[in-house]
Image: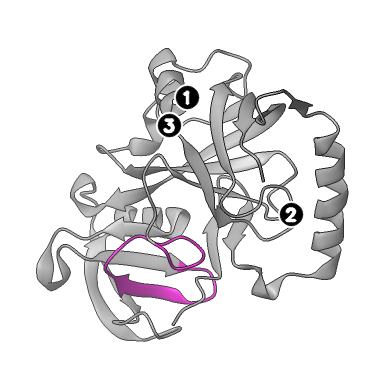
């Protein structure tokens, strides 16, 4: 069974990975950053913690139907229990394949593999699957699954986004986007390589892209200086 080790997120310049390949220097650095972050957390009587200054990014599942670029051949594994396979997996729009490499997963809608998912991992390459997966092999849950450095926020930690902060240029986040993100109840189910996600960075899963050029959609936003409400560890 794949360990789902690494899905490269170029936009966030980190790896979402399982912890088996961690290096001690990253772990020690993350521990120091986590202690520093904890000093700024406000613990109220409700048992929940309000914590400001977070960087929130998003990831999604690409959908073949929203891409019309020239098709390119893809090789990889026809089954999950495989690494760096060379089986022919089909021909898919170039933009769809690029999105899968950036986000980790994409739903196929044409050909013999229609209804399945083209998944990608930095260490494993492409493989066909029946679901989009987190770094532990579990199906991703839209507006629930979130990733963090496990030395900062451990697996299963529940949280809500209570303040959206601003965009990178200091402008306000689209009100509809902010309301949607704030209304969700997130849970840390995915993870970065310890030390690479940063002490105040979470990545939240939106589900499937909803149309062409999804990365230009307001929903595909990054929140700077966001505020989180954290459940008990």
Q: Is 13 situated above or below 176?
A: below
Q: Is 120 situated above or below 60?
A: below
Inspect the magenta stretch and tell me whether residue 124 lies in it: yes
Q: Which residue is mark 1?
A: 182
Task: Locate residue 6: give its quadrant.
Answer: bottom right
Answer with left or right where residue 138 lies relative to residue 40: left
Residue at 48 percent across and 77 percent down: it is: 124
Q: Main secondary structure of the magenta part?
A: loop
Gap between marks 1 and 3, in whole Å?
6 Å
Magenta-highlighted residues:
121-138
Q: Earlier in the sequence, mark 1 or mark 2?
A: 2
Answer with left or right where residue 107 lies relative to residue 10: left
Asked which secondary structure carries label 3, the reply is loop
**Do the numbered discs 1 and 3 sit on residues whose CB atoms are within 8 Å?**
yes
Q: Which residue is mark 3?
A: 184
Q: Is 7 situated above or below 83?
A: above
Gap between marks 3 and 2, in whole Å?
23 Å
Q: Which mark is residue 45?
A: none
Residue at 68 percent across and 50 percent down: it is: 197
Residue at 36 percent across and 86 percent down: it is: 86
Q: The N terminus is located in which quarter?
A: bottom left
Residue at 77 percent across and 29 percent down: it is: 41
Gap between marks 1 and 2, in whole Å?
24 Å
Q: Earlier in the sequence, mark 3 or mark 2?
A: 2
Asked which secondary structure carries label 2, the reply is loop
Q: Residues within 10 Å of mark 1 (few under 14, many from 20)?
A: some
Q: Which residue is mark 2?
A: 151
The image shows residue 3 at horizontal and vertical percentages of 51, 76
């Amino acid at each position: 069974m794949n360990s789902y080790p690494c899905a490269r997120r170029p936009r966030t310049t980190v790896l979402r990975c399982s912890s088996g390949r961690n290096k001690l220097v990253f772990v020690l650095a993350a521990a120091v950053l986590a202690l520093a972050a904890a000093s700024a957390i406000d613990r109220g009587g409700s048992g929940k913690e309000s914590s400001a200054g977070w960087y929130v990014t998003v990831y999604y599942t690409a959908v073949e139907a929203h891409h019309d670029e020239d098709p390119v051949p893809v090789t990889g594994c026809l089954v999950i229990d495989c690494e760096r396979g060379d089986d022919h997996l089909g021909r898919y729009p170039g933009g769809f394949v690029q999105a899968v490499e950036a986000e980790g997963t994409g739903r196929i809608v044409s050909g013999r593999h229609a209804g399945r998912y083209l998944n990608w991992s930095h260490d494993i390459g492409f493989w066909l699957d029946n679901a989009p997966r987190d770094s532990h092999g579990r199906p991703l849950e839209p507006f629930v699954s979130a990733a963090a450095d496990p030395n900062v926020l451990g697996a299963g930690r529940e949280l809500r986004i209570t303040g959206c902060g601003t965009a990178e240029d200091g402008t306000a986040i689209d009100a509809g986007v902010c309301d949607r993100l704030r209304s969700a109840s997130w849970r840390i189910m995915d993870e970065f390589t310890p030390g690479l996600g940063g002490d105040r960075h979470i990545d939240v899963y939106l589900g499937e892209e909803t149309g062409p050029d999804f990365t230009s959609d307001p929903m595909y936003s990054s929140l700077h200086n966001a505020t989180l409400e954290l459940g008990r560890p």
